[in-house]
């Protein structure tokens, strides 16, 4: 159902924003983040005091929102077949099938049409929503 998809998208986006803010917060856990916190601070810390004040956090939030809007526009352009401005169930199924096929192709390194335990074990650990990043709980 589209409502469930919308709620899931809002939850994921909220978690992404919360993760970005947590990564930028002083004292945030940086283990397993690959230096993401340092990158965020370097990018948004305009007064170079080593932390993000409210103005800098607002600029970061604005950029994250713009990036999400850009990603949404790209998804709509690619998958909104009936051009109604929404991803309906059939379009969502197409999008998910394509994502699964891409992920499978990345895992099936020898292109034999199946994923062996060795291929599975060799795969890079995936974070939220199957996109590269850190392992949960670490």
Image (tube, grey):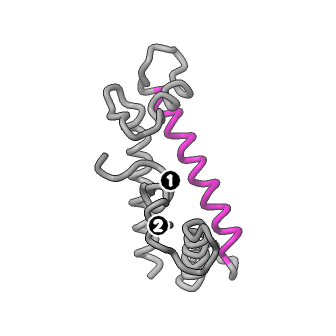
- Are discs 2 and 1 less than 8 Å apart at CB? no
Q: Is residue 81 above or below residue 85?
A: below
**Which one is nearer the viewer's eye here, 109 or 2?**
109
Is 42 contained in the magenta span? no
User: Real-space Cα distance between discs 2 and 1?
Assistant: 19 Å
Identify the residue under disc 2. Answer: 118
Q: Quadrant of residue 7?
A: bottom left
Task: Tell me what residue is drawn at x 47 percent, y 78 percent.
Answer: 2
Residue furthest left as drawn: 137
Q: Is residue 19 above or below residue 105?
A: above
Across and down, in percent, residue 58 comes to 48, 33
Magenta: predominant secondary structure element? Answer: helix
Identify the residue under disc 1. Answer: 132
Instruction: Decide: few, some or many residues near mark 1? Use Cα within 10 Å; few <14, some 14-19, many ≥20.
Output: few
Residue 83 badge: none
Labels 2 and 1: the sequence-earlier one: 2
Across and down, in percent, residue 81 comes to 69, 80
Task: Tell me what residue is drawn at x 43 percent, y 46 percent.
Answer: 17
Element on which disc 2 rests: helix
Magenta region: 55-80
Q: Quadrant of residue 13?
A: bottom left
In this rendering, the label closer to the viewer, 2 or 1 = 2
**Which one is nearer the viewer's eye here, 89 or 108?**
108
**Which one is nearer the viewer's eye here, 124 or 37?**
124
Answer with left or right where residue 32 lies relative to residue 41.
Answer: left
Across and down, in percent, residue 126 comes to 45, 57
């Amino acid at each position: 159902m589209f409502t469930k998809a919308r709620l899931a998208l809002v939850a994921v986006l909220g978690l992404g924003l919360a993760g970005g803010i947590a990564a930028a917060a002083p004292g945030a856990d940086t283990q397993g983040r690959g230096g993401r916190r340092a990158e965020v601070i370097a990018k948004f810390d305009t007064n170079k005091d080593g932390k993000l004040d409210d103005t800098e956090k607002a600029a970061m939030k604005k950029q994250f929102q713009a990036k999400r809007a850009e990603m949404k526009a790209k998804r709509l352009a690619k998958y909104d077949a009936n051009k109604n401005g929404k991803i309906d169930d059939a379009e969502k199924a197409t999008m998910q099938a394509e994502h699964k096929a891409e992920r499978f192709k990345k895992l099936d390194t020898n292109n034999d049409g199946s994923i062996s335990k060795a291929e599975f074990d060799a795969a890079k650990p995936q974070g939220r929503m199957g996109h590269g990043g850190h392992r949960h709980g670490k």
